[in-house]
Image (spheres, helix red, strand yellow):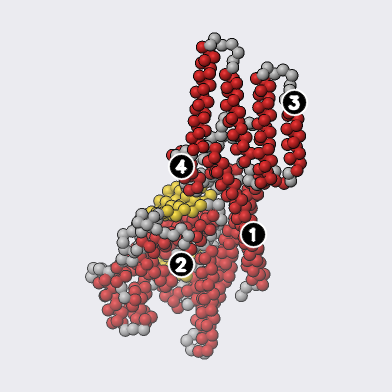
């Protein structure tokens, strides 16, 4: 797997690079600002870009804008954004981006959980999603505050399953996380699909729709 | 983890900040005192205007200023505060002016009648004089009579137009003296301007006035100007303090983000790598130790994140007021329409924060009271009009909000600290509208 990383904080950038290399992931380019990042991405055409949000010169949302621009140039590029704060708007913008590449939005400290982080890297590089559980929790909170939504009809247990789905986990991983059987997870998911009125087509597609139902009202 | 220098920096920052806050509180307290006087002056002016009708009599000594304009802007200008362009003036003056127009008091009616009568009588006199074949222009004496009456009234009005007692007595004395002198000189001119006989009366009048002036403590003179200057100064320094405070807060947030937070993340990452290197067959106690350290780091990061968010929501910092309010609107359970076409630039940090928290609180209130799922709709309008940012949040909920409720009172404090204004309107049954106006530079 070939990865490009943009992070203005040298200590963090080098740390992440070292961590990826230790785990046999090839880091083909590094950048400290958005301009350099776009240059590196265009030159190396990686499978995955790991981006910080706040970058020089203005330290606002350059990372998000650069990531979306990179996706325009390389539609299959996976985008994994590492941020120090939860911001549903950015998550939604990433999810709404055109292209076939995967999308991830993680809080930076998740890098400390090496195995979880590498999982997320693999998923996003493979075209999947990896949303931080804090991001998902915020989205769920918004949706349940919204009232009248079909999400409201879900039981707490089903909502928990949906949150884990939104993080991009497989049924097996959800079963493990919730300490229940595989069959129980499948039952919950089928209940979610029914309650959200999702047509019985390809399973994976319904999964994405269910997650998007979460995100829709948050723009 | 952090070098001593860096650990001390935030500490000295917060000490500086506390110091600024203390100064600010002090200034506010002083300002509150001033504004009591200020209100008293305004109230007195209102009463006077009420007493003397919409405009003072013409031909008053030294040309009394035209007072027909509504008093609020005039008073504001005099005290160095900009007039409020949109909000209706406070009920006292607004309603007062309206009431005067609708139903003039007995005194006003009399003065208007008198002026009308004066014009009619003068016209009649001139006609009679003309019909009589001219000659000496005697209607001038009729004019003189009317001028005396109106002049006296104006002199009294001006004399009473001082806030404090010693100054008021002296002003009354001064203007009555001016009036008397004017009458004497007018009589002298009208009588053919012969030998200047008013010289002695004028001398004595002047002497008595001088005596009064010497007996009056000098600091009472120009009290109004002093107050106005003081208010100007306080307004300026306070806004300076607020700007400094906002900039400092933003810097602390940036320092946290780039400094402590980033280092903790790096720490957590190093711990993760260490744990991975130890492998699965490592000593369980060691693994537990590392995991414990990681959990500590995670909590510290989360705490710092909450702290940063409290200073300003990230989206507000990154993308500004409109983006932050729109995001807030989308997350509301109500149907919220945002019209922010009138805001085409970033505004000063303090203004963005205050406007954001007003919109946010108003939305929360609307959601709380309008009842979710009832199809309630909210309209948020933001526009820049000259040096003002105007924010309106209107819902179609049950209305009847208590403008003194703790949430609204907090917002009011926040808005007024910036010399802005917050109004909450809406009787029970007619929805609630919150309007905030904030000076935002031009």
Q: Residues within 10 Å of mark 4 (few under 14, many from 20)?
A: few
User: CA separation, marks 3 and 1?
Assistant: 55 Å
Residue sitting at x 53%, y 18%: B125
N-term mark: 1 or 4? 1
Give the alpha-carbon distance from disc 1 to disc 2, as whole Å: 38 Å
* Residue ID at (61%, 28%): B148
Per the model, the C-alpha gap separating discs 1 and 4 is 39 Å
Which secondary structure lies at badge 4? helix
Residue identified by numbered label 1:
B26
Q: Which residue is mark 4?
A: B99
Asked if residue B251 is positioned above or below residue B260 in the image, the reply reads above
Is A209 left, or right, of B38 in this rendering? left
Residue B223: horizontal and vertical position, in percent? 67, 46
Rendered position, B28 above or below B276:
above
Query: Do discs 3 and 1 share a chain?
Result: yes
Q: Which numbered disc covers residue B199?
A: 3
- In three-dimensional space, the C-alpha distance between marks 4 and 2, rounded to whole angstroms, equals 55 Å
* Circle 1 crowding by C-alpha within 10 Å: few under 14, some 14–19, many from 20: few
Q: Is residue B100 left or right of residue B260?
A: left
For the N terminus of chain B, the quadrant is bottom right
């Amino acid at each position: 797997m070939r990865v490009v990383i943009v992070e203005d904080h040298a200590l963090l950038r080098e740390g992440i690079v070292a961590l990826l290399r230790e785990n046999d992931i090839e880091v083909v380019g590094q950048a400290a600002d958005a301009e350099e990042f776009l240059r590196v991405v265009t030159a190396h055409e990686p499978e995955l870009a790991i981006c910080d949000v706040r970058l020089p010169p203005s330290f606002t949302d350059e990372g998000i804008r650069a990531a979306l621009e990179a996706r325009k140039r390389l539609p299959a590029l996976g985008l994994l954004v590492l941020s120090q704060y939860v911001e549903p708007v950015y998550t939604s913008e990433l999810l709404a981006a055109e292209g076939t590449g995967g999308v991830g939005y993680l809080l930076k400290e998740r890098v400390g959980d090496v195995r979880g982080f590498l999982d997320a890297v693999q998923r996003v590089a493979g075209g999947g999603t990896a949303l931080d559980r804090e991001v998902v929790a915020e989205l769920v909170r918004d949706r349940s505050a919204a009232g009248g939504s079909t999400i409201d009809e879900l039981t707490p247990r089903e909502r928990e399953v949906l949150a884990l789905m939104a993080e991009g986990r497989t049924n097996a991983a959800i079963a493990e996380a919730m300490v229940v059987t595989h069959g129980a997870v499948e039952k919950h998911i089928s209940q979610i699909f029914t309650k959200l009125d999702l047509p019985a087509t390809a399973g994976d597609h319904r999964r994405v729709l269910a997650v998007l139902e979460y995100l829709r009202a948050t723009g | 983890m952090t070098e001593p220098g860096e650990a001390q920096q935030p500490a000295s920052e917060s000490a500086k900040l506390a110091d600024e806050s203390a100064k600010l509180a002090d200034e506010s307290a002083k300002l509150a005192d001033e504004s009591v006087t200020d209100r008293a002056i305004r109230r007195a002016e209102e009463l006077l205007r009420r007493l003397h009708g919409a405009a003072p009599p013409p031909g008053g000594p030294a040309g009394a200023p035209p007072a027909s304009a509504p008093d609020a802007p005039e008073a504001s200008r005099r005290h160095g505060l900009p007039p409020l362009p949109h909000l209706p003036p406070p009920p006292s003056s607004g309603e007062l002016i309206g009431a005067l127009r609708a139903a003039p008091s007995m005194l006003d009616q009399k003065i208007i009648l008198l002026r009308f009568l004066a014009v009619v009588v003068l016209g009649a006199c001139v006609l009679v004089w003309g019909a009589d074949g001219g000659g000496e222009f005697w209607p001038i004496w009729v004019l003189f009579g009317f001028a005396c009456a109106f002049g006296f009234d104006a002199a009294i009005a001006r004399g009473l137009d001082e806030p404090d007692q010693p100054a008021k007595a002296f002003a009354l004395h001064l203007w009555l003296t001016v009036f008397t002198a004017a009458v004497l000189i007018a009589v002298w001119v009208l009588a053919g301007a012969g030998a200047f006989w008013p010289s002695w009366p004028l001398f004595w009048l002047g002497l008595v006035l001088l005596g009064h002036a010497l007996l009056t403590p000098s600091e009472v003179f120009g009290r109004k100007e002093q107050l106005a200057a003081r208010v100007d100064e306080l307004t300026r320094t306070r806004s300076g303090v607020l700007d400094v405070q906002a900039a400092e807060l933003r810097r602390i947030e940036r320092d946290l983000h780039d400094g402590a937070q980033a280092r903790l993340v790096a720490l957590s990452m190093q711990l993760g790598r260490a744990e991975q290197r130890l492998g699965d067959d490592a000593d369980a106690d060691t693994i537990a130790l590392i995991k414990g350290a990681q959990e500590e780091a995670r909590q510290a990061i989360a705490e710092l994140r909450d702290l940063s968010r409290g200073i300003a929501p990230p989206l507000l910092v990154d993308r500004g007021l409109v983006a932050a309010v729109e995001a807030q609107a989308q997350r509301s359970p109500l149907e919220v329409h945002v019209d922010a076409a009138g805001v085409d630039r970033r505004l000063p940090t303090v203004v963005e924060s205050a406007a954001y928290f007003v919109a946010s609180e108003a939305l929360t209130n609307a959601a709380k009271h309008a009842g979710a799922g009832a199809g309630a709709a909210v309209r948020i309008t933001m526009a820049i009009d000259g040096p003002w940012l105007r924010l309106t949040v209107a819902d179609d909920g049950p209305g009847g909000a208590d403008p003194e409720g703790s949430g609204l009172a907090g917002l009011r404090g926040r808005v007024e600290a910036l010399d802005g204004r917050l109004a909450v309107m809406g009787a029970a049954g007619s929805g609630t509208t919150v309007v905030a106006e904030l000076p935002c530079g031009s």
